[in-house]
Amino acid sequence: MEATQTMNAFRARHQGGPDTLIYEPVARPVPNSGEVLVEVHAAAITPTELTWDPTWSDDRGKSRLPVIPSHEFSGVVAKLGTDVTSIVTGDEVYGLIDLPVGVPRRWVPCGKRASVVLIITSHA
């Protein structure tokens, strides 16, 4: 059985401002079909991001805690999920993860203020 790999991330365990963020180890995500894993080199948390309702809860009001905030990032593609053909390992990428209405807001629970992040390639 393979041991769970970890990464470091800024995470909030309860709603609040920047003082609630804790830098700690968390489980490293693994890309599924149509996803890529990006090694994050830079990320940003906007000044108001921690006041946005979607940061803390989903469209039905269910809590996302603990949350890894940030939706702006740059880095290098580290690993590909299956069925990924539009990008290759080693590509330098950047993004602002704001998904259109009706698309699950995956950027919030898997924020970019971490060592790595998963990106859905259909939205890249």
Image (cartoon, rainbow, N blue to C red):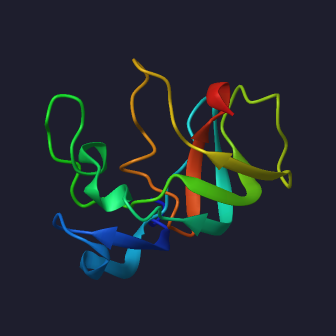
| For residue 122, side relative to residue 64 (left or right) | right
Task: Please give the name of the residue rendered at 82% of the width and 29% of the height, measured from the top-left corner.
Answer: 86
Which residue corresponds to the image point at 47% horizontal and 58% vertical from the top-left? 70
* Residue at image point 49% right, 24% down: 100
Residue found 54% across the figure and 49% down from its top: 30
Tell which of 25 and 50 is nearer to you.
50
Residue 44's spot in the image, x, y percent? Answer: 55, 65
Identity of the residue furthest to the front in this view: 47
Q: Residue furthest top?
A: 102
Q: Is residue 16 above or below residue 89?
A: below
The foreground one among 73 and 81 is 73
Residue 28: image x %, image y %?
49, 62
Q: Quadrant of the C terminus?
A: top right
How far across and down, in percent of the image, does residue 46 sit?
A: 47, 61
Taking depth in this image into account, of 65 and 59 the one nearest to the observer is 59
Check the picture and name the quadrant holding the N terminus: bottom left
Q: Relative to residue 2, is residue 122 depicted above or below? A: above
The image quadrant of residue 115 is bottom right
Query: In the image, is 86 to the left or to the right of 13?
Result: right
x, y percentage for residue 17? 26, 72
Residue 56, placed above or below residue 74: above
Left or right: residue 113 versus residue 81 is left
